[in-house]
């Protein structure tokens, strides 16, 4: 008897999942987020493999071939060729490498600075908070495009790689203010919680209170903000490349490829493959990042419901049975009417 009661209790007992497992299940249940994730991974793999392939084989992006200029897409050149006879497929994928560098480096810089400054401002408050918030207001007032124009003119004679890192630094230094405000607000609410009061009573160092106890509780906000910053940085770099303010030829970027295609209306109308493929790649990449960010935001939300694989299977079976019964009832009504 006792064994049967224990068996029934174990069957009815719910499985307790950790917060990380719940987030993973919610994310995997979000079809749009998973579509964005697979799209992101596919593009990144293509870009990384192409980059290292060109490095090992010594592929020259500056090499021209007038005999195949402006050729439409074919088996040999899937994305066609430009007016210099250069393969658009290789240039589009290599342009993604530039975007990945800008996105990852500027996002890492912005998240590191924003998380540190926001945590310090929220934890200490008072004069420290006032100084950091005034600094944030000053940086938020800087016109990004004007700074990019000025620095581009100053470093015009420098190598393209150097100008790329200048753009990364500008994006990183001007993108952390929004995250810092969010982190500060959450730290102000958390610092009076019981677990932080207990750390003070135990004499734990302030540095450990911030980075070991407070920061882990705001990582959800950091992750979502990082995805948005990543997408924004890539778009900003593409915009600067379109205006010839980022790296220059022969290094390809998505913005530079679009800029070359827009030099005359003939290219836009006749040689559509020159602009549609880099534009589509940029669109798909940014959309995949935004879908991942939205999926993470919904997954981290504690109010959102989640279901396990067994529960989803049971729900599908229940819906199927309901449809079968409804169809059977409808058939019975028809037979009774006859």
Image: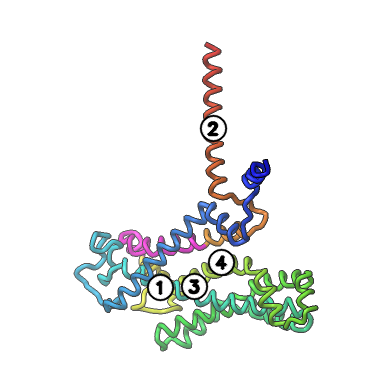
Residue appearing at x 49%, y 56% in the figure: 34
**What residue does disc 4 label?**
228
Label 4: which secondary element: helix
From what the image shows, is residue 67 above or below residue 170? above
* Range drawn in magenta: 265-289
Q: Are marks 1 and 3 in contact (CB under 8 Å)?
A: no
Query: Percent x, y for residue 85?
Result: 25, 70
Spatial CA distance of label 2 from label 1 is: 50 Å
Give residue 183's quadrant in the image: bottom right
| Quarter that holds the N terminus | top right
Residue bearing mark 3: 103
Crowding near the residue tagged with mark 4, few <14, some 14–19, many ≥20 C-alpha atoms within 10 Å: some
Give the CA separation, mark 1 to mark 3: 10 Å
The residue that appears at 52% across and 67% down in the rendered structure is 231
Type of secondary structure dominating the magenta stretch: helix
User: Which numbered circle lies on residue 4?
Assistant: none
Earlier residue among tags 1 and 3:
1
* Residue 111, picture quadrant: bottom right
- What secondary structure is marked by label 1? helix
- Which residue sits at x=66%, y=77%? 211
Question: In the picture provided, is 151 more to the left or to the right than 78?
Answer: right
Q: What crowding class fits label 3: few (fewer than 14 Cα within 10 Å), some (14-19), or many (20 or more)? A: many
The residue carrying pointer 2 sits among few (fewer than 14), some (14 to 19) or many (20 or more) residues within 10 Å by Cα, namely: few
Q: Position of residue 114 (x, y in %)?
A: 63, 76
């Amino acid at each position: 008897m006792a064994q049967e009661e224990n068996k029934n209790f174990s069957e009815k007992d719910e499985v307790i999942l950790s917060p990380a497992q719940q987030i993973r299940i919610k994310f995997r249940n979000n079809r749009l987020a998973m579509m964005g994730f697979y799209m992101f991974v596919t593009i990144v793999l293509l870009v990384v493999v192409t980059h290292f392939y060109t490095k090992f084989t010594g592929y020259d992006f500056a090499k021209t071939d007038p005999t195949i200029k402006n050729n439409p897409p074919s088996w040999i050149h899937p994305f066609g060729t430009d007016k210099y006879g250069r393969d658009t497929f290789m240039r589009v994928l290599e342009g993604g490498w530039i975007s990945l560098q800008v996105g990852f480096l500027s996002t890492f810089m912005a998240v590191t600075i924003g998380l540190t400054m926001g945590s310090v401002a929220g934890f200490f408050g008072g004069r420290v908070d006032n100084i950091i918030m005034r600094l944030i207001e000053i940086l938020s007032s800087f016109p990004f495009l004007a700074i990019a124009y000025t620095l581009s003119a100053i470093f015009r004679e420098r190598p393209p790689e150097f100008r790329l890192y200048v753009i990364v630094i500008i994006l990183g230094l001007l993108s952390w203010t929004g995250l810092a405000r969010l982190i500060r607000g959450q730290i102000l609410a958390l610092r009076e919680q019981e677990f932080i009061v207990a750390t003070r009573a135990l004499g734990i160092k302030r540095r450990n209170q911030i980075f070991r106890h407070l920061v882990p509780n705001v990582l959800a906000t950091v992750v979502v903000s990082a995805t948005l910053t990543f997408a924004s940085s890539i778009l900003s770099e593409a915009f600067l490349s379109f205006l010839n303010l980022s790296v220059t030829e022969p290094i390809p970027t998505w913005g530079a490829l679009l800029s070359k295609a827009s030099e005359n209306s003939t290219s836009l109308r006749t040689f559509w493959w020159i602009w549609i493929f880099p534009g589509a790649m940029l669109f798909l990449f940014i959309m995949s990042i935004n879908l991942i960010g939205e999926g993470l935001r919904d997954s981290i939300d504690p109010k959102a419901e989640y279901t396990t694989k067994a529960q989803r299977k049971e729900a599908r079976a229940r819906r199927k049975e309901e449809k079968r019964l409804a169809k059977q009832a409808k058939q019975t009504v028809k037979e009774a009417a006859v």
